[in-house]
Image (spheres, grey):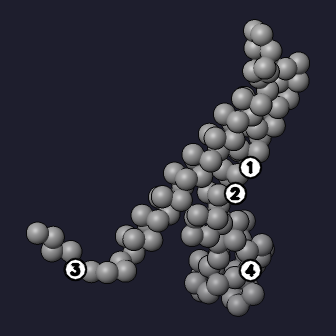
């Protein structure tokens, strides 16, 4: 009873991107949990945190944050830093860090 006959639509790519982002989130949470587990001395009776536990947990959160940022940047269509710029006067593509348009000489603030 489904009448959606279109295959390979852009919504598929968007769905895949969403899936990838949730995968990254799961991975980041897993790394943070792992760092907490590693900083706990389970074999002791009673179990307690290692003296360097804050360091391990901080490292886990830091590496998790790095993976999160890198994953989000790669899952996005294009990084915001490398977005092409266009001249507002002649609407031609100009270098990212151009102070004035190489085509019409228009200056940018
Ligand atoms: Zn221009």
Check the image and report above or below for 102 versus 15.
below
Which residue occupies 45% across, 71% down? 13
Can you tell which of label 4 and label 2 is closer to the viewer? 2
Q: Are marks 3 and 1 in contact (CB under 8 Å)?
A: no
Callout 2: helix, strand or loop?
A: helix
Can you tell which of label 3 and label 4 is closer to the viewer? 3
- Which of the two discs, 4 and 1, labels the residue nearer the N terminus? 1
Badge number at residue 66: 1
Check the image and report above or below for 47 versus 79.
above
Name the residue tied to disc 4. Answer: 95
Q: Would you identify the image quadrant in which residue 105 lies?
A: bottom right
Badge number at residue 70: 2
Residue 91 percent location from the top left of the image: 58, 84
Callout 3: helix, strand or loop?
A: loop
Which image quadrant: the N terminus?
bottom left
- Which of the two discs, 2 and 3, labels the residue nearer the N terminus? 3
Can you tell which of label 4 and label 1 is closer to the viewer? 1
Instruction: Measure the C-alpha gap from mark 1 to mark 2.
Output: 6 Å
Instruction: Measure the C-alpha gap from mark 2 to mark 3.
Output: 35 Å
Q: Residue furthest left?
A: 1
């Amino acid at each position: 009873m489904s009448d959606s006959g279109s295959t390979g639509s852009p919504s598929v790519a968007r769905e895949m991107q969403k899936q990838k982002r949730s995968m990254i989130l799961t991975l980041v949470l897993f790394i943070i949990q792992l760092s907490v587990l590693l900083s706990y001395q389970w074999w002791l009776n009673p179990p307690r945190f290692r003296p360097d536990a804050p360091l391990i947990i901080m490292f886990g959160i830091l590496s998790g944050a790095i993976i999160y940022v890198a994953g989000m940047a790669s899952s996005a269509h294009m990084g915001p830093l490398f977005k092409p710029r266009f001249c507002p006067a002649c609407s031609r593509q100009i270098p990212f860090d151009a102070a004035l348009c190489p085509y019409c000489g228009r200056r940018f603030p």
